[in-house]
Image: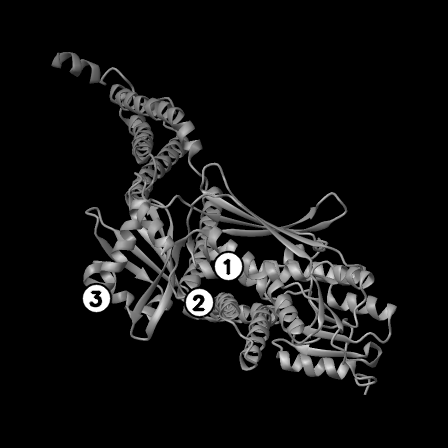
Amino acid sequence: MLGGLDSFFDSSGFIPHGVCLLWKPEVLALHVGADVLIGLSYYSIPIALLYFVLKRRDVAFSWVFWLFALFILACGTTHFFSVWTLWNADYALEGVVKGVTAVVSLLTAVALWLLMPKALALPSQTQLTAANQALHREIEIRRQAEQRYAGFFNNLVEGLFVVTVLPDGHFAFDTLNPAHSAATGLDPDCIRGRLVRDAVPHETAEAVIERYEACVAAGGPIDYEETLDLPIGKRTWHTVLVPVRDDTGRIVQILGSARDVTERKRLQEELVQTSKLATLGTLAAGMAHEMSQPLNIIRIWAESALSRLRDGEADMARLDKVLSIVADQTERMGKIIDHMRTFSRRDGSSTQLFNPADSVRAAVELVSNQFALENIVVTMDIADELLVTRGRPLQLEQVIVNLLSNAHDAIAEQRAATGGPRDGRIEVCMRCDPGQNSAVILLTDDGGGIDPDILPRIFDPFFTTKEVGKGSGLGLSIGYGIIDAMNGRIEAINIDHGDGRRGVRFIITLPVSRPSAQEMERAHA
Amino acid sequence: MPDTLHILVAEDEPLAAMALEDFLTGKGFRVTLAQDGLEALERHRDDPADLVITDLRMPRMDGRALIRALRAQDASLPLLVMTGFLALEPGQDDLTADVWKPLEILRKPISPQVILETLARLMKPGGAAA
């Protein structure tokens, strides 16, 4: 075997390659010079390639660079061997070197073609630059957005806060904005990550944790009003909590916003009070009339009886009759005064469950006698069902009286405009939906209707069509506020009665429920 | 003042009408009652009164319409108006104007004694116009 190898590499039978060049020095010099230069160049290329690969560890397909280095190194070696074989006829050894070079070249060529699709898929420098620029733009947009949201978060007067819902169900503060910080006295840096029950006083913690738990239980936004005793005084907040879920659907965060509504509530109450006074004003004339009637009856009967008594004409039967009349009339006056009281007194701050039909009846009774004197008939059609709604009964009564008073004014105005004495009609009707979830109060007049152009504005505060001094323009807007606070709805539409009469229908929709026995007792109390 | 003076009372409150009837008949007047303006006009047509006492607010036909109708028929018929209203509303006839005389206005509640005095003033020839 070794003998075989020896004979393979035995070069004694060959003649050096220089013989072919006839040892002509200039040809020899050209070959040697060219091959040496090519060899040296080839040898330097792998060094550059390897230097590049070693410096740029992130370069894709680095093994190809190694393969290239090897391939070029082999090519360089063949050139150096060409110089060697000019004088030494080691053609077998040269063949081995060429063979190795061939294998490496083939590998490189195949690898290159196999790699081509992947290499083409690599982003070009232009593409990378474009992508880079796009990324920068994106970053800039996001930075601006973040700045904007941070601006919201930091500058909103509404208090904002984020609460983390821990896996064990406990709540921890995440952050809160400066407005909320100022209002509550909590420092965002001090409370971040702390359990709610540790970060705020026990009583407050209990109250807010109950709300957070309610939000998690509801699985959706909840909103409520709460009055908290803070160092700056008792403040009322309207708070909204929104749960945030992770990919698995678990509620991991609660976003909260809290608005200080103390001033608004006070103002609202004042407006209600103002509107009461305005309603009271329009009713004052009617009230004076109502009061003067029984007083008149009492006075005439009493003085007449007194006169007979002094003349010695009085008998027991007459005195009995006169005193009974007097007693009846004082009772009548007492009822009028009771109604007046409902308007002058504040309604108390808490809501209660009550039957809306009672308020409607009371309102109609309050005005129907007075209206009848002006030939305005108020009819009442109320379904006999006991359902309750939450709110303040006297406020609802005030809304109905205000609507009745408006209807009265519209009829009177139309009567004055058309000249003739004409009967007016106001229908008050109350019905429940079949599911008994809502009650609808319909109040329809025949006072000519409302100009469609102004119909959408009638619930705006201070909007009035009455002449200066006759209406504050607050009645309907306050009514709207009251019904809204009861989670109800009030709207107005024009109605054509079909017999030449036209008018307005106010539709009040209120949420109702069937009362429990206990609630029934309370509603009646 | 003749005791047989016939007074027509237009008043929609039955107890107030009865009180006046009781008092005035006790004082020797003859009294006819009407519940509203229209009925008062009918009664007056059937049995003319010497004097008419009327309320202002009444159903069907109110006191103002009644006064207009009566004044149109008889310029000298004495009229006594009883009202519970404090203020005159815009657009209404001002009943204190001379054109309505002889006419007196009394504000409720009214003392029977004042009614008597006013009646006397109205029935005195030329008294109400003074």
Residue A180, x across and y down, in percent: 35, 66
Quarter placement of the N terminus of chain A: top left
For residue A330, side relative to residue A91 (left or right): right
- What is the three-letter code of the residue carrying label 1? Glu
Q: Quadrant of residue A299?
A: bottom right
Q: Counting residues from the N terminus, which is met first, the one under dot 2 or under dot 1?
A: 2
Q: CA distance from mark 2 to mark 1?
A: 20 Å
* Residues behind callouts 3 and 2 on a single chain: yes
Q: Counting residues from the N terminus, which is met first, the one under dot 3 or under dot 2?
A: 3
- Give the residue at mark 3: A201
Residue A257 to residue A183: above or below: above
Callout 1 secondary element: helix
Residue ID at (31%, 34%): A69
Q: How is the image coloured?
A: one colour
- Give the residue at mark 2: A265
For residue A278, side relative to residue A421 (left or right): left
Q: Is residue A10 visible?
A: no
- What is the three-letter code of the residue carrying label 2? Lys
Q: CA distance from mark 3 to mark 2?
A: 26 Å
Callout 3 secondary element: loop
